[in-house]
Image: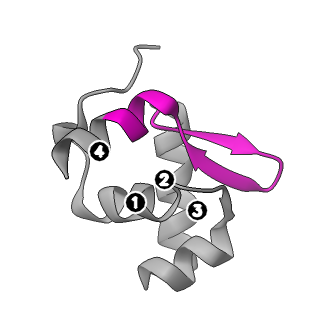
Amino acid sequence: MACGTDLTALSQSEKVMLAVIQEEAKTADDIAKESKQPIFKVRSGMRSLVEREFAQEEGEAYRATEKTIARLKKEA
């Protein structure tokens, strides 16, 4: 699977989820609360982000990958 570094391929909701987990790992429930998105959308979105290597799982939590964090900071 190709490494996910092209942030233009992300939906707006995926970008919001990544922003929430940029600084620290958070559970799907925390991501849903902070991003104001339904939990089903967060779970689905996070699965997709992990599969595309934009995020990684840490137990029951998710964190943005180092490459993704670097790209997000460049865009800011």
Please, what secondary structure does the residue beneath circle 4 have? helix
- Amino acid at pointer 3: Arg
Q: Residue furthest right?
A: 59
Q: Looking at the picture, how far across and down is residue 72, in whole percent?
A: 30, 45
Separation of residues labelled 1 and 2 (CA atoms): 5 Å
In the image: residue 17, left or right of residue 62: left
* Residue 30 vs residue 24, the one in the foreground: 24
User: Mark 4 Cα within 10 Å, few/some/many (few <14, many 20+)?
Assistant: few
Q: Earlier in the sequence, mark 1 or mark 3?
A: 1
Separation of residues labelled 3 and 4 (CA atoms): 24 Å
* Residue 1 vs residue 22, the one in the foreground: 22
Residue topped by disc 4: 73
* Residue 30 vs residue 51, the one in the foreground: 30
- Amino acid at pointer 2: Gln
- Amino acid at pointer 4: Lys
Q: Earlier in the sequence, mark 2 or mark 4?
A: 2
Question: Which residue is depicted at the point 41% across and 40% down?
Answer: 69
Is residue 69 shown above or below 18? Answer: above
Is residue 52 shown above or below 43? Answer: above
In the image: residue 33, left or right of residue 5: right
Q: Which residues are magenta?
A: 54-70
Mark 3 or 4: in front is 4
- Asked if the residues shown at circle 1 and circle 2 are in contact, with their CB atoms under 8 angstroms apart, the answer is yes
Q: Which mark is residue 19?
A: 1
Q: Is residue 53 visible?
A: no
Q: Looking at the picture, how far across and down is residue 6, in whole percent?
A: 24, 29
Residue topped by disc 2: 22
- Amino acid at pointer 1: Ala
Residue topped by disc 3: 43
